[in-house]
């Protein structure tokens, strides 16, 4: 039903009194948006060099101490990958639908293009023998992969279009390319076996956007002497997960395959327990049972040892784990430590030297390198980024049977004799978490505008173990709202906050929680719901990724509509009195615009103050700078109009 957005084409981008902010606030939005984001960092196996990719800023290489930086590729370039000897670097470059693979030899020679294909390329990975590079490939791709981007406009005969993402292998010396996975399988992630003869792949048949949640582990024979039928390659299934799985990695001795398994709501936002199976798919075991943390990434450092990136109660942590179950906490702190898009580090062959993307509430992301916990900053790209808020603090509280954690971001200067307004910012997911990273535009602007910003991690979040992440199964909105409200009480008890001036906002699942909360309580005096879900019953038939809902609700909406209805804001819409601003992208496939229309229409019909803004040609993630500015100004303007 996404086509309703196009047919109706409502767009409110006119300026209203409540949407106006002073010029300095607009400048802050722009300044935060200009903070350079690092997509990933990779240290060379010999620990001599570090490569990183910046959003629209290309791929750069420097010595491990940060000296001699050189730009390898400008503009749209990503996924730097080192050869096993550390002397060559590969990356992909070009616009999302027409990328190519490039290779450069460090110490001499110009970058060399090694593919001449039409399509989307991602995640290049050198074979252990250094002769080939495998990568994810969507031939003739019409858009970038993933459900966050704007969906194709739904007009004409509506059919599910499946653009399969396969694995291609290119010979580095000759440029000869082979597709090594079947045409009816969408591959999400993969890894080489140590003998360069096989791949382990996380894959599923059908739609890539929708079927991540039912992906299984497969093995493909890809060696030059494997006898693979190039026209009809095959993969052998070796493991079916109980929930979702991610990031399969072959052990250096080839005996085992490790992977993360758990309840996950978004592809790429990984969390769960670390599992191990033999390379033939037998002898599955959980290496982190009942750990009070979520494993988000890992790397093998030896045949019997791994380095884990973990979320522990909202904090980044690195843990050394051996196959006999012994663990050692190497780093934990009030900062965000990542190697790519999840907590973790890029580790050299020595198992000690690492490179990370390091950020915090008071410092923007930069590249750091060195021994774990002894990193030295090697970039200063964001040295002029604004910090117009106070020192953040982690807060813990009890809610029912759970210990819950969240973050408080205060205004820059707090007078204890005053009472301040506060906005609760609920993260998306729900399997995700608020962590100690440099704040995004909206929360930064709220804190800079004089608001306390409270970012809770209620049940369903990462950071407290799988039991906590699964605690909102068949219970969306109920227990997690209890956690949020008890967290609000805990924050008020320890900070100078006016209990009568509390607002609420969120995007995606946070947008749903906003819509849900205003039907359940009058605690919030104003709300902003971004890309929310107002009716799980109708949502099931409108969205492009319904497979993610089965693990959470236990059945499809057609088999058990009551479990969907009990968590739907529309079932309780008569209770709403809170002024609510509703925001959404026109071509959002994850949380389609009709969900926002339905909620806005009900509030308007019942005389509740509301406004709906639909951003043209946007998907679930808002990309256009002008639209980001408009959202920021409207959001702060809405709260200023009701909480000041």
Image: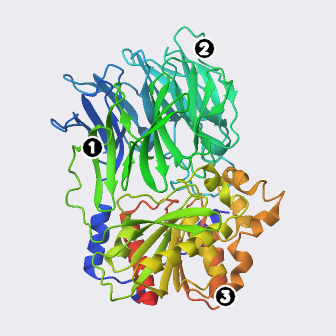
- Tags 1 and 2 in contact by the CB under 8 Å rule? no
Disc 1 on helix, strand or loop? strand
Numbered badge on residue 605: 3
Q: Quadrant of residue 447?
A: bottom left
Please state if 209 lies on the left or on the right of 499 as rendered: right
Q: Position of residue 70 (x, y in %)?
A: 19, 36
Q: Determine whether 140 is above or below 180 in the image.
A: below
- Residue plotted at (33% across, 79% down): 449
- Tags 1 and 3 in contact by the CB under 8 Å rule? no
Numbered badge on residue 228: 2
| Residue placed most toward the observer, 342 or 27 | 342
Q: Earlier in the sequence, mark 1 or mark 2?
A: 2
Figure quadrant of the N terminus: bottom right
Q: Quadrant of residue 602?
A: bottom right
Q: Position of residue 409 (x, y in %)?
A: 38, 70
Outermost residue, bottom direction?
Answer: 607
Q: Earlier in the sequence, mark 1 or mark 3?
A: 1
Please state if 396 lies on the left or on the right of 217 as rendered: left
Numbered badge on residue 368: 1
């Amino acid at each position: 039903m996404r086509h309703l957005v196009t047919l109706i084409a409502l767009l409110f981008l006119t300026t209203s009194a409540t949407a106006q902010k002073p010029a300095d606030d607009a400048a802050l939005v722009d300044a935060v948006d200009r903070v350079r984001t690092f997509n990933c960092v990779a240290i060379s196996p010999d620990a001599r060099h570090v490569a990183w990719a910046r959003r629209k800023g290309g791929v750069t290489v420097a010595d491990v101490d940060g000296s001699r930086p050189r730009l390898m590729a400008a503009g749209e370039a990503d996924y730097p990958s080192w050869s096993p000897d550390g002397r060559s670097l590969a990356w992909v470059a070009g616009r999302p639908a027409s990328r190519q693979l490039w290779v450069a030899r460090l110490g001499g020679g110009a970058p060399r293009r090694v593919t001449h294909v039409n399509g989307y390329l991602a995640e290049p990975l050198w074979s252990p023998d250094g002769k080939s590079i495998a990568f994810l490939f969507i031939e003739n791709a019409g858009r970038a992969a993933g459900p966050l981007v704007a969906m194709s406009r739904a007009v004409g005969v509506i059919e599910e279009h499946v653009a399969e993402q396969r694995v291609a292998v290119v010979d580095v010396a000759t440029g000869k390319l082979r597709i090594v996975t079947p045409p009816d399988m969408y591959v999400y992630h993969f890894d080489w076996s140590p003998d360069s003869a096989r791949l382990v792949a996380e894959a599923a048949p059908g739609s890539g956007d929708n079927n991540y949640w039912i992906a299984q582990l497969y093995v493909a024979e890809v060696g030059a002497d494997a006898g693979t039928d190039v026209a009809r390659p095959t993969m052998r299934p070796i493991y079916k997960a109980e929930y979702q799985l991610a990031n399969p990695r072959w052990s250096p001795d080839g005996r085992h395959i490790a992977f993360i398994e758990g309840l996950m709501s978004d592809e790429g936002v990984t969390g769960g327990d670390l599992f191990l199976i033999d390379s033939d798919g037998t002898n599955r075991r959980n290496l982190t049972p009942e750990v009070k943390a979520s494993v988000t990434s890992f790397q093998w450092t030896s045949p019997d040892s791994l380095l884990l990136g973990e979320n522990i109660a909202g904090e980044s942590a690195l843990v050394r784990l051996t196959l006999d179950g012994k663990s050692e906490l190497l780093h934990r702190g009030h900062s965000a430590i990542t190697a790519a898009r999840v907590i973790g580090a890029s580790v050299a062959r020595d198992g000690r030297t690492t490179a990370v993307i390091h950020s915090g509430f008071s410092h923007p992301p930069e590249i750091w390198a060195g021994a774990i916990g002894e990193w030295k900053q090697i970039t200063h790209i964001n040295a002029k980024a604004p910090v117009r808020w106070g020192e953040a603090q982690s807060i813990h509280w009890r809610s029912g049977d759970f210990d819950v954690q969240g973050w408080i971001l205060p205004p820059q200067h707090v007078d204890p004799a005053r009472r301040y307004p506060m906005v609760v910012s609920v993260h998306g997911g729900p399997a995700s978490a608020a962590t100690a990273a440099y704040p995004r535009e909206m929360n930064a602007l709220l804190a800079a505008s004089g608001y306390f910003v409270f970012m809770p991690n209620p049940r369903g979040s990462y950071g407290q173990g799988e039991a906590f992440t699964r605690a909102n199964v068949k219970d969306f909105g109920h227990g997690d709202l209890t956690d949020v409200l008890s967290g609000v009480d805990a924050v008020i008890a320890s900070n100078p906050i006016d209990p009568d001036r509390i607002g609420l906002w969120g995007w995606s699942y946070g947008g749903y929680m906003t819509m849900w909360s205003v039907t359940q309580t009058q605690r919030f005096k104003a709300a902003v719901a971004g890309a929310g879900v107002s009716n799980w019953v109708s949502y099931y038939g409108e969205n492009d990724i319904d497979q993610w809902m089965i693990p959470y609700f236990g059945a499809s909406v057609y088999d058990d509509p009551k479990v969907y209805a009990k968590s739907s804001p529309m079932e309780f819409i008569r209770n709403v009195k809170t002024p609510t601003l509703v925001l959404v992208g026109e071509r959002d496939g994850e949380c389609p615009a009709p969900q926002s229309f339905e909620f806005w229409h009900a509030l308007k019909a019942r005389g509740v103050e509301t406004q709906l803004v639909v951003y043209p040609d946007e998907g679930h993630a808002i990309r256009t700078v002008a639209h980001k500015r408009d959202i920021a100004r409207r959001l702060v303007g809405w709260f200023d109009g009701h909480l000041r």
